Image (tube, rainbow, N blue to C red):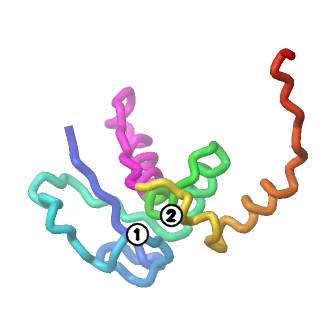
Amino acid sequence: EQMLITEAKGGTKEGPQGPHRIQGIGAGIIPKVLDVSIVDEVVAISSDEAESMTQELWMMGLPTGISAGAIVAAATQVAARSENEGKMIVAIIPSFGERYFTHPMFAKVKKEAEEMKKQEVNMGN
């Protein structure tokens, strides 16, 4: 068993956080409830990686925030490692995306949803 956490990667640099667009991941803030002694690895994710995964999650019907996209992107990278073949990887998404419906990143998804043609539902009556 391993415990991994996600950290924002500013620009292309690794290590200390730089400017990023991942809402919900603070600038080096470590919550008091996090026992860092149990953390085996910190997986750095760029804003672009987080946003791309967030878009994928939305298109799968999982509206999440960008920080959740970062978490799933990190889990996907960890799962792709050869030493993890056949292992179960669990990613905990800490919030739902309802608060992000008006975020500019989701304008395309919103527009597509608004342009969808309504379909009549036949309830067998």
Q: Is residue 107 above or below residue 64?
A: below
Q: Position of residue 100 (x, y in %)?
A: 57, 65
Crowd tier of the residue under label 1, counting other residues whose Cα lies within 10 Å: few below 14, some 14–19, many 20 or above: few
* Left or right of 92 in this view: 59: right
Q: Quadrant of the N terminus?
A: top left
CB contact under 8 Å: marks 2 and 1: yes
Viewer-closest of 114 and 121: 121
User: Disc 2 residue type?
Assistant: Ile
In this picture, residue 87 sits left or right of residue 39:
right
Q: Mark 1: which secondary structure?
A: loop
**Res. 24 mark:** 1
- Residue bearing mark 2: 66
- The Cα atoms of the two marked residues, 2 and 1, are separated by 8 Å
Q: Earlier in the sequence, mark 2 or mark 1?
A: 1
Q: Residue at x 47, y 71 (%)?
A: 22
Instruction: Where is residue 17? Give x, y as percent.
Output: 34, 79
- Residue 37 locus on image (x, y percent): 9, 57
Q: Quadrant of residue 106?
A: bottom right
Residue 70 percent across, percent down from the top left: 45, 59
Task: Quadrant for residue 42, please give it.
Answer: bottom left
Tell which residue pokes out farthest to the bottom in this image. Answer: 19
Which span of residues is magenta-colored? 71-94
Residue neighbourhood size for the residue with mark 2, other residues' Cα within 10 Å, grouped as few (<14), some (14–19), many (≥20):
many
Relative to 40, is 22 on the left or the right? right
Three-letter residue code for mark 1:
Gly
